[in-house]
Image (cartoon, coloured by chain):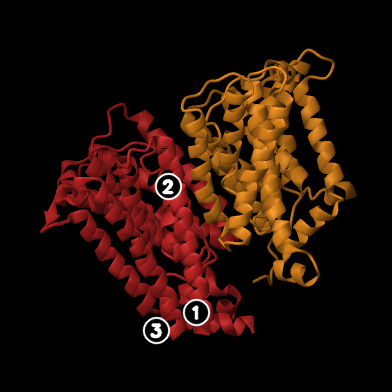
Chain colours: A red, B orange
Amino acid sequence: MTVLRGGLKGVTASVPRSLGTLVRTRLTTVAAFALAALLFIIGTAYASGFASLSNVRTLAVFASVMGLVGLGETFVILTGGIDLSVAYLVDFGGIQLSYMTRTLQVGLWVDVLLVVAMGIAIGAVSGFLVAVTGAPPLVLTLGVGGLVEGYLVAVGTLQSAGDVVPPGIEHFTAGYLGPVPNMTLVWLGLAIVCALVLTRTTLGRRIYLVGTNPRAARLSGIHVNRVRFTTYMVSGATATIAGVLLSGFVQTSYIGMGSSYLFGSVAAVAIGGTALVGGTGSVWGTVGGACTLTILAFLLPILGLNSATVQIADGGIILVGVLLARRLQLLGRTGGR
Amino acid sequence: MGWLRRLHVDIVMLPLFVGLLITDVALQPDILTKAQIALTIQTALPLVLISIGEGIVLLSGGIDVSVGGSMVIANVLVATWGGSGAAQSWHILVIALIGVACGAFNGCAIVFGKLHPFVATLASWAIYDGIALQLLPSAGGSTPSGLTNWAQNFNATLPTPIIVLVVTMAFLWYWRSTRTYKCIYSVGSDEGRAGLSGVRTGQTKFIVYALAGLLAALAGIYLALTTASGDATSGDGYILPAIEACVLGGISLNGGSGGLGLAVAGAFIVTFVEGITSALSLPSWVSFVLSAGLLIVVIGVRSLLQRKPQQT
């Protein structure tokens, strides 16, 4: 029975949407955006400049970084895994680009492509280890992250000069297309691609099925490990892109600049209604979750709270957000079947 | 060798533990005096206590990343509240109960809120860290002098860290034959079946998180007494090492497999690795790579050994 149910759920989650799945995935997404909107309204009520174009642009830029990391994390979590190496990959994206620009000088966009390719390769290492050993991804990705951090410390000690970000990237991340920052365009563009992959392709359908019921997936002839492997590569790519863009925007790169994304990306995914056991969730939910967390991070300090209270409120609202998402998931499940 | 198997010691853990111990001793032969052994145990004890708590949660099939938060609340409470003479032991008791409350809150969110333990404890970790930061914004404070002197006493026939470790181990030895412990195992192996066999799964999970909070608080209290001060940021560095210690020791993250003695051994493995890398005075990147590489190799090899050919 469980096999059958799992199999059906994986299929309905993608192309022929049943009412229940539709309600479940859309409700949690709507809730994540509603929470973001609520926080934004509170912000505009408390601070006059909160809704100004420049502030909204800054919010959009930082939401883009969180959201990019969250995109890949969503893929991994949908299969029932977790990737904690993303924080170190964000560091890697920034520092490795600075390092390669200093040493190689083959042109900025070649460097960026190479760095992202290396990020994908690191994701592939995580995916390979998870697939081959079957060990828990939580610890394996942490170990891979430790190796990356070791490498970055080594690069830092070999190079005494400060990490200067290539001006081309600084220019790109500071730019806008109309009112929208370039970084946000990259984020939303990739989000559309990811959403299409998840809902319109065989790979996407397989990702949902592997997360819902790996046994059923294997019995239906899916290479479960290959699917998992792919999701870690996606995660490596998005986290590295996020690191490259973040270093451009803050105009420096340093070890630890990605540390807030270690658990932040997981929180964004969870608020967006993706279940940590896998199988349920969507890219757009994570987009909403990233908006929520970013607005929250900007809102709390201007409410006149000290850093300790900010942290308490941060945890409290994350708790409320995930409780809400969980309630709606359960609601969708009973209503749909 | 049957007793080793009964304690869930596997073929990876034993050589690892013994090998690291020998390497550590070979690199620094002077650590074999009584005072140095006590010092090593003192360094390891907060991680040992917090790893036991994490181990209980992992055995039940959950995970707790808020242990660092419960730990620092206790830690700063000892340093900011326990200054007066007469009421000090009473205060410590209350602080330990506050740790239980922190854990019970997690238990509520997971059992009644039906949240994934990782997400629930992630949020409560931020809350607990914030509370601790509110209580003691910058590191400092003072600890009750009597208890501090007791905790730092290395000159007695049995130095205090050795006593604490032995008492902890003795308690674990007793606890492993209780009903609660067996309920935790059964919930960790298969929650649905445990419920069908009459185990109160919700209650068991609640107890598990409360105990993790208690042990984290004990770790925070002990750390405050040995450093004679409180620090609201001291807990973050224990969360991932505690999970690492459990995994290196051989507790499965899927629940229902392993033993709490392994968490203690794992905590010492982590401490030995730190001791070895600092004794060799390696560049920091080498020690990063060594400890991360060790983690990957150990859990990778263990999972490969345990993987059955037809397992799905």
Q: Which residue is mark 2?
A: A314
- The answer to whether marks 1 and 3 sit on the same chain is yes
Residue pictured at 59% horizontal, 85% vertical: A4
Q: Which residue is mark 3?
A: A15
Q: Are marks 3 and 2 in contact (CB under 8 Å)?
A: no
In the picture, measured across the screen, residue A141 lies left or right of residue A168, that is: right
**Closer to the camera: disc 1 or disc 2?**
2
User: Tag 1, which chain?
Assistant: A
Mark 1 closeness class: few <14, some 14–19, many ≥20 residues within 10 Å: many
Q: Which residue is mark 1?
A: A10
Q: Is residue A134 visible?
A: yes
Examine the rendered structure and indicate whether residue B27 appears above or below residue A138.
above
Examine the rendered structure and indicate whether residue A208 appears above or below residue A296.
below
Label 3 is placed on what type of residue? Answer: Val
Q: Is residue B51 visible?
A: no
Query: Can you give x and y, in whole percent of width and height, for residue A335 in the image?
Result: 50, 81
Label 3, label 2: how many angstroms apart (C-alpha)?
A: 36 Å
The residue lying furthest to the top in this view is B155
Residue pictured at 80% horizontal, 26% vertical: B163
Choose top left, top right, bottom left or bottom right for residue A231: bottom left
User: Tag 3, which chain?
Assistant: A
